């Protein structure tokens, strides 16, 4: 009898636990829709309107929970959160699974802080203009790469399968829909004009991928006027394409203050009330006004009640938007966690910091290594100079570290290049530090000290670039040279004759012509997160073999802008497609990156050299590590339809894989060729595979010299 009761009790608690877990973000869409309908019927107009702004407070009468938000571009934008490498560095890893691992950790920190809705990832495709300060927030200039990274980011943050939106995951927001960086002056928020073809070929693919593949829960339109229609009232794209064609079933949150900007910036809505009506009718469900300033708000009681007087039909839009917000709260399981308390302070855990370091080491790009200066041999040097405005931490008065990049809170700590090298060499090597100059002034007062440090050392580590004060949202530039007197500092240290390793710490590609020509070794590190210096030191001394590659092209000057590998045929064969007195090619190209070892590509072949228009095949290549060190190679596949019914880019990335190879090891890398990567948009803007020959190029970068080609025939 006791045994039977014990079994019954165990069975009962298993059922209870299963029921609770099912109640937490595991309800079906039908169940949630029914609950939302009932709840909506109980709400007053005031209670409905309250749900249409971010961080709507808990409704105690009806038990509606708060849905707190943050940014999580490369970690939560919250003090004490783990800070990972900035997005542009994440792109340089070319390894989507790392982003999924990162955002899995970000989601855990978010839940611990009662944050369940994040305004990330940024899926903007950077189209060749690094004057634009938000370059650092993107994964690069290629739509295929950005798509893969974006899907991985969302899958890690939201979870997949039965884990989607469970207690360990949160809701992502894809932004900025769409074509936001495509403006004529490199200015944040500048209007974008483009053809339908360019929109569909370049800017829409990442958003389509996260909607269809990752089922992203939220989306944010861009600030800008797009082809004459501000995105926050662009019904053909937000409703016709996003919801009706792609099947997006989440909610749309405005970018900051952007519903009111239909009046104040775009001068389309005549007043605040008209702006609110336009936003709601377009399907903008939530009015994001950071700080909830009434001066910028539109979805408020006073405004929407006046809007209902002008146009009573918008009550259906209000109900629809409230339903979408409530649906998100049910999906996230927030109704089941109502009243739960959370720690006052977020704690960054060692396991999350370890992930940050792992990603940082994989993000570093070796751009140049003349005479194999790197890696340094600790047994052959007695002193090392660490010089430059970015060599040490330079903590700001607000407690933030400017070398972490934008959208970062006050990190628990930041390991600088100087600290990383000191920790690495200990007492074995003397470290001579001199700042040399500031980023933000033209003073050369520190040059003499820096020159002396170099002269008294066997080798120089020169850390230059930018910071969150020189690059980021709203920090656009009209030139891309090293800011301040950094270039003069580089020239002065170069004159000492000492071997120099340039460490670039920056958020955008820079026109570093002198460094590229004169400095023997160059590491592009972007912003590598809270363990930056540790990752850089491990790379300098060979504990980490760099394998990252560029996802944005480096211009020689602003006169080259836009500079991108995504070019179409021009007069280059006749000489008319060149600059008269300057080189047309980028300083460093998309996909470029070196290693401390060498790789050889051979035996490129197709499983089937001829396929039908609806068929598929595979292309494979053998990659061998021909050097003496283990290392990573990023194998890239580009495709071109040789003769088609419309103009095309010379080549487009359609496959990539990062592979680890031991010294002497060979691996076969294989890519599938199918409708998705062989298709083009024809003259009727239908996606088709046209019969004919295709050039399939595989290799180490987008440069012709690094690629081997093979022909595929489609019949």
Image (spheres, rainbow, N blue to C red):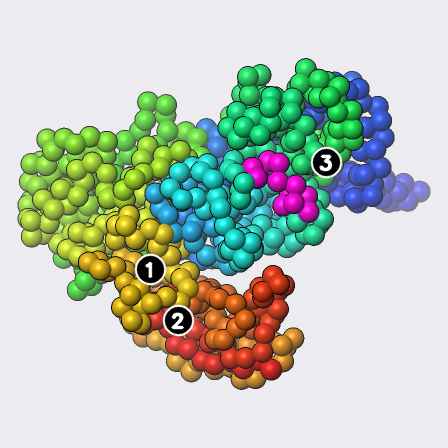
User: Which secondary structure lies at badge 2?
Assistant: strand
Residue at the spot of label 2: 699
Residue 537 appears left or right of 441: right
Q: Is residue 147 visible?
A: no
Q: CA distance from mark 2 to mark 3?
A: 46 Å
Q: Nearer the viewer, residue 407 or 616?
A: 616
Which comes before the other along the chain, label 3 or label 1? 3
Mark number, residue 589: 1
Q: Of discs 1 and 2, which sits in the foreground?
A: 1
Q: Give the main secondary structure, helix, strand or loop, of the magenta stretch.
A: helix
Which quadrant of the rendered structure holds the N terminus? Answer: top right
Residue positioned 75% across, 19% down in the render: 309
* Residue 552 place in picture, x, y as percent: 38, 54
Residue at the spot of label 3: 324
* Residue 535 place in picture, x, y as percent: 33, 48
Q: CA distance from mark 3 to mark 1?
A: 43 Å
- Extreme-right residue of the structure: 1
Q: Which residues are magenta?
A: 229-240
Which comes before the other along the chain, label 1 or label 2? 1
Q: Is residue 50 magenta?
A: no
Q: Is residue 232 magenta?
A: yes
User: Which secondary structure lies at badge 1?
Assistant: loop
Q: Nearer the viewer, residue 254 or 64?
A: 254
Mark number, residue 20: none
* Residue 254 place in picture, x, y as percent: 59, 33
Quick check: 529 above or below 689? above
């Amino acid at each position: 009898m006791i045994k039977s009761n014990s079994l019954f009790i165990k069975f009962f608690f298993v059922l209870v636990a299963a029921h609770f877990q099912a109640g937490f973000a595991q309800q079906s869409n039908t169940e949630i829709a029914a609950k939302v309908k009932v709840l909506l019927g109980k709400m007053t107009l005031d209670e409905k309107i309250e749900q249409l702004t971010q961080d709507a407070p808990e409704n105690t009468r009806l038990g509606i929970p708060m849905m707190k938000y943050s940014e999580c571009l490369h970690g939560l934008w919250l003090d004490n959160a783990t800070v990972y490498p900035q997005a542009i560095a994440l792109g340089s890893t070319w390894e989507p699974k790392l982003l999924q691992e990162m955002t899995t950790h970000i989601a855990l920190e978010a839940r611990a802080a009662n944050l369940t809705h994040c305004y990330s990832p940024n899926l903007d495709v950077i189209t060749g203009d690094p004057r634009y300060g938000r370059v650092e927030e993107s994964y690069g200039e290629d739509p295929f790469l950005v798509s893969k990274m974006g899907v991985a980011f969302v899958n890690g943050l939201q979870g997949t399968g039965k884990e989607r939106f469970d207690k360990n995951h949160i809701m992502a927001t894809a932004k900025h829909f769409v074509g936001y960086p495509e403006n004529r002056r490199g200015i944040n928020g500048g209007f974008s004009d483009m053809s339908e073809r360019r929109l569909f070929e370049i800017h829409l693919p990442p958003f389509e991928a996260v909607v269809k593949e990752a089922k992203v829960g939220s989306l944010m339109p861009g600030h800008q006027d797009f082809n004459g229609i501000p995105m926050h009232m662009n019904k053909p794209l937000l409703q016709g394409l996003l919801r009706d064609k792609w099947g997006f079933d989440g909610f749309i949150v405005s970018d900051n203050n952007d519903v009111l900007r239909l009046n104040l910036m775009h001068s389309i809505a005549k007043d605040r009330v008209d702006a609110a009506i336009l936003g709601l009718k377009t399907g903008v469900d939530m009015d994001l006004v950071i700080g909830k300033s009434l001066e910028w708000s539109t979805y408020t009681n006073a405004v929407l009640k006046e809007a209902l007087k002008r146009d009573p039909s918008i009550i259906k839009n209000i109900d629809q938007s409230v339903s979408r917000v409530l649906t998100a709260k049910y999906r996230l399981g927030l109704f089941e966690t109502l009243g739960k308390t959370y720690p006052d302070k977020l704690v960054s855990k060692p396991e999350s910091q370890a992930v940050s370091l792992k990603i940082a080491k994989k993000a570093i790009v070796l751009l140049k290594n003349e005479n194999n200066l790197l890696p340094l041999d600790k047994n052959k040097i007695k002193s090392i100079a660490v010089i430059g405005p970015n060599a040490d931490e330079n903590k700001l008065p607000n407690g933030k570290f400017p070398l972490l990049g934008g959208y970062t809170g006050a990190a628990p700590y930041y390991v600088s290049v100087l600290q990383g090298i000191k920790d690495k060499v200990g007492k074995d090597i003397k470290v001579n530090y001199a700042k040399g100059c500031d980023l933000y002034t033209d003073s050369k007062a520190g040059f003499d000290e820096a020159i002396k440090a170099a002269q008294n050392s066997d080798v120089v580590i020169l850390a230059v670039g930018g910071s969150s004060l020189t690059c980021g949202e709203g920090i656009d530039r009209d030139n891309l040279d090293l800011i301040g007197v950094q270039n003069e500092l580089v020239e002065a240290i170069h004159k000492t004759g000492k071997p120099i390793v340039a460490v670039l710490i920056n958020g955008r590609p820079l026109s570093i012509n002198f460094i590229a020509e004169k400095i023997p070794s160059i590491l592009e590190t972007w912003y590598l997160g809270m363990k930056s210096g540790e990752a850089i030191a491990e790379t300098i001394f060979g504990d980490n073999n760099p394998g990252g590659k560029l996802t944005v092209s480096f211009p020689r000057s602003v006169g080259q802008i836009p500079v991108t590998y995504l070019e179409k045929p021009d007069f280059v064969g006749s000489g008319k497609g060149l600059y008269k007195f300057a080189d047309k090619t980028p300083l460093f190209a998309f996909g470029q990156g070196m290693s401390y070892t060498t790789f050889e590509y051979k035996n490129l072949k197709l499983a089937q050299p001829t396929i039908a228009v609806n068929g598929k095949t595979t292309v494979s290549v053998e990659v061998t590590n021909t050097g003496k060190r283990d290392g990573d190679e990023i194998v890239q596949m580009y495709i071109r339809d040789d003769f088609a019914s419309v103009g095309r880019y010379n080549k487009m990335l359609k496959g990539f894989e990062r592979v680890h190879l031991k010294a002497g090891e060979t691996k076969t890398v294989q890519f599938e060729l199918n409708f998705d990567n062989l298709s083009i948009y024809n003259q009727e803007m239908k996606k088709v595979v046209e019969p004919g020959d295709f050039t399939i190029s595989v290799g180490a970068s987008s440069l012709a010299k690094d690629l081997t080609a093979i022909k595929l025939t489609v019949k």
